[in-house]
Amino acid sequence: GAVNTTYLVSIKGTRYVLQKMSSIFDPSLMDDIAFITDHLFQKNFTIQKIIKTVRGENLVVDGTSWWRMLDCIEGQTYEIIKSAVYAKNASRRVAELHTALLDCKYNFKFTLPHYHDVDFSIETLHVTLQKNFNHPHYQALKDTGESILTAFKTIPKIHNLPKRIIHNDL
């Protein structure tokens, strides 16, 4: 994984995903994941199952770190979209996930501050460009940053969208 330390482990021929979770996550995240996965299981949606500890817990705390284990869904991972067909199939699956979550109501225990807060990110980019003109990489990144800010101004603002549970990491 890009954020967590991830291992593929095999126990008596069965494969699992073992993760040492990043310190940016609080263990209460597992309560949130358990609720959402239970909701999706009830809808026969294929998703990784949490493998509980021998004590029936969703995670193990090891000093200042915590770990989780999930079952392994066999398949293939693509790091590059090979064709429009791949993109269409992936987007269809995301739509199926979001549709399965439409009736899900839940107050999350764990959230990352400003996670996917576009206005906050745009303001941070604006301030960063203003304050860091002496940085050695400034010239290489300036045009990209400014083009993002310019493009953002052209995106119409949509207000009063309904709040929904979605997968924010896509």
Image: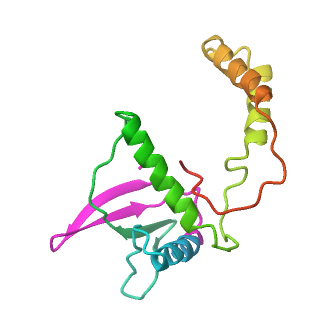
Residue that appears at 40% across and 80% down: 52
Residue that appears at 75% across and 25% down: 149
Residue 16 location in percent, x, y?
29, 67
Residue 116 location in percent, x, y?
67, 47
Viewer-closest of 99 and 165: 99
Residue 167 location in percent, x, y?
57, 56
**Residue 3 appears in view:** no
Viewer-closest of 139 and 80: 80
Q: Is residue 39 left or right of residue 163?
A: left
Residue that appears at 74% across and 20% down: 132
Quarter of the rendering containing residue 83: top left
State whether residue 148 is above or below residue 71.
Answer: above
| Colouring used for the render | rainbow
**Residue 92 appears in view:** yes
Q: Residue most toward the right?
A: 159
Q: Is residue 16 magenta?
A: yes
Which span is picked out in magenta? 1-29
Residue 36 location in percent, x, y?
55, 72
State whether residue 73 is above or below residue 124.
Answer: below
